Amino acid sequence: MEYSGEHFDVIVIGAGIMGSCAAYQMAKRGKKVILLEQFDFLHQRGSSHGESRTIRCTYPEDYYSDMVIESSKLWEEAESEIGYRVYFKTRQFDMGPSDDKSLRSAIETCKSNSIPHRVLDRKQVLEEFSGVFEIPENWVGLSTRLGGVIKPTKAVSMFQTLAIQNGAVLRDYIEVNDIKRDHERGGIRVCSKNGTMFSGNKCVVTVGAWMKKLVKTVTDRVLPVQPLHTTICYWRIKEGYQENFSVDNGFPTFASYGEPYIYGTPSLEYPGLIKIAVHGGYPCDPDNRTWVPTLLGNSMSSWIEGRFAGQIESVDPVITQSCMYSMTPDGDFLIDFLGGEFGKDVVVAGGFSGHGFKMGPVVGRILADMVLNGEAKGVELKYFRLDRFEENPRGNVKEYEDQVNSYA
């Protein structure tokens, strides 16, 4: 193997939303950064592509709300630097059975964190949304101001462009197959499958569904991260009702608690269509996927008929798209120093469990703080430790087991 010829302050492996945000943050601080991607940039084989993601601060876990609020500000800051929009604001509407533990916890989180919100009964939901949303008598709704749609592929491109503008080096088609201590030069040596080695003081690993494979290769440590193949669905809005579901008219991003957990966005990316999808999927190998869609058939159709007053064609979706989740047993992130012989020189971030994209900017900030300062301010990282699964295979203990691993 031969060295690339340069020594970097930080090597970032994985150019999805988390790696791109981290590279941007460190380059903005004047550090010499290289961002490596195993496929081409903006590819569709991972978890950071597509037409839309939701942003919301309604979480059962109170440690996510502040992260989302900070991330919302960082999204706007990046937009002001690049000069175009990737974040389209609207309300967030959560709904579910009144006794659903996760939904009740989300309401309590809004209260404890002073997040402006309204809890609505069936009649109030009909009035609030002009009859577009209908919920059963025993359900409640939760309406909050912080919601919206993020354009994923465009957003990743934005952060990569900003990283380049701040001096970062970006290289694609570099498949990393090992990370070692560099005993000759000091720091970290990153080895690629094509024979090139990269030298750096520190390293950040954000490889999504490939996290388990790479960490096992590097340390023999097995992280409990299960890749899932998931399917995004778009449904046709019936003639005459299209304006009811547009982001310009204030239609919200939304989530429905219970089984199945369903989420969606306003009509934005495809005229006349609305995104409504089920959280979840089937286990897959990210290098050997079948790409077969996961659909819930009658249960999905029944939910759509029951919630949208017959204004959406509910027999079958007209577009399906593939994506991947990287699930942890408790649905919480993995953000930690790799430890062992690497100490604090290698930071890993993964297991974002289908709900991390919205927090890409704040995760990028956290990773930059960790790798450059040895700690991150303003966030409680104990919930994201790697070794929590050694203490309890299920990870963080939660009182609302009905909704663990069911986020969007």
Image: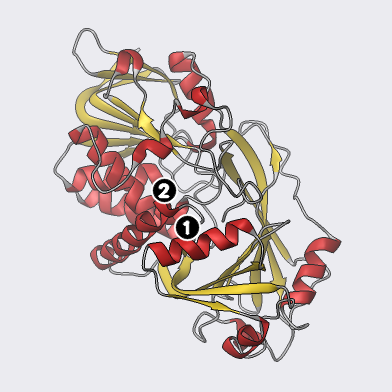
Q: Is label 1 in a helix, a strand or a loop? A: helix
Residue under the image location 60 percent in, 46 percent down: 404
Is 182 left, or right, of 252 in this rendering?
Answer: left
Is 334 left, or right, of 165 in this rendering?
Answer: right
Instruction: For residue 172, say whether it is visible.
Output: no
For the residues bearing labels 1 and 2, Cβ distance under 8 angstroms:
yes
Label drawn at residue 152: 1
| Residue 105 image offset from top left, x and y in percent | 53, 58
Instruction: For residue 364, say whether it is visible.
Output: yes
- Amino acid type at circle 2 is Ile
* Quadrant position of residue 119: bottom right
* Quadrant position of residue 120: bottom right
| Residue 406 image offset from top left, x and y in percent | 62, 51
Residue under the image location 59 percent in, 76 percent down: 267
Mark 1 vs mark 2: which is more N-terminal? Answer: 2
Quadrant where the N terminus lies? top left
Mark 1 → mark 2, Cα distance in angstroms: 8 Å
Q: Residues within 10 Å of mark 2 (few under 14, many from 20)?
A: many
| Residue 153 image offset from top left, x and y in percent | 47, 56
Q: Is label 2 in a helix, a strand or a loop? A: helix
Residue linked to disc 2? 17
| Image vertical order of residue 63 relative to residue 371, above or below | below
| Residue 401 image offset from top left, x and y in percent | 63, 46
Residue under the image location 75 percent in, 50 percent down: 294
